Amino acid sequence: MAAVCLLWANLATAVWAQQIVLRCDPARTGADFTLGDVLHQVKGAFDLKRGEFHFDPVSGKVGGEIVFDATSGRSGNRGRDRKMHKDVLESAHFPEIGFRPDRVDGKVSPDGTSRVQVHGMFAIHGAEHEITVPVEVKLETDHWSASAHFPVPYAKWGMKNPSVLFLRVGDSVDIELHAAGSLAPALP
């Protein structure tokens, strides 16, 4: 029994020493948003279009991308959503919102939960913006999950603030990302 445990530990260490692939499951991955105004908060969500990451646990380098369908954005109010798509996101012209990570700052544990900083490029409204996002990630034998919470300063990034005479909203929107999926060693 001890030999089996030792063999399993050596195999897990060997797998962890190589690049791993984290694929997003669309049913378990999404992006929620919250935009505050003086009276209440508007909440909504975007659907995943695609997502896959390639992570080297030794160097901390990460590649791949996660992309959301900008046209899927919904807040539960058709008029507000129409204005969001037409005037703010211009989703007919810019149908994707994405993040391309390039490195992880901090140590990712091969089993259990880790809190790290992920650096990369956030693409929205036809432009890319460099950001670093705090991420909580949990890796297990064959699956993973992660969550991140960060602001997007949409007005600063060139999108229109939808405020009107008596309704004032903030210049940034809070994003709550939740992702999960399969985990496997990268093929050589």
Image (cartoon, rainbow, N blue to C red):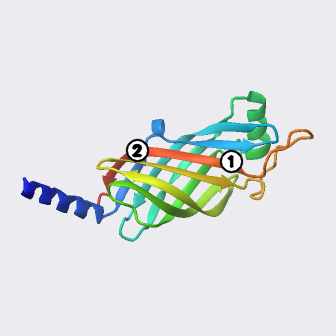
Q: Residue at x 82, y 41 (%)?
A: 38
Between 136 and 159, the residue placed more toward the observer is 136
Foreground tag (2 vs 1): 2
Q: Answer left or right for 73 relative to 13.
A: right
Measured from the top left, where is residue 78 in percent x and y? Answer: 74, 28
- Quadrant location of residue 71? top right
Which residue is disc 2 drawn over? 181
Instruction: Check disc 2 and give the amino acid type.
Output: Gly
Q: Residue furthest right?
A: 165
**Left or right of residue 8, residue 25 in this image:** right
In the rendered structure, the answer to whether residue 172 lies left or right of residue 144 reads right
**Which residue is located at x 49 percent, y 41 percent?**
29
Q: What's the mark number on residue 94?
A: 1
Give the position of the C terminus as an image quadrant: bottom left
Q: How many marks?
A: 2
Q: Amino acid at mark 1?
A: Phe
The x and y percentages for residue 83 are 79, 37
On residue 31, the disc is: none
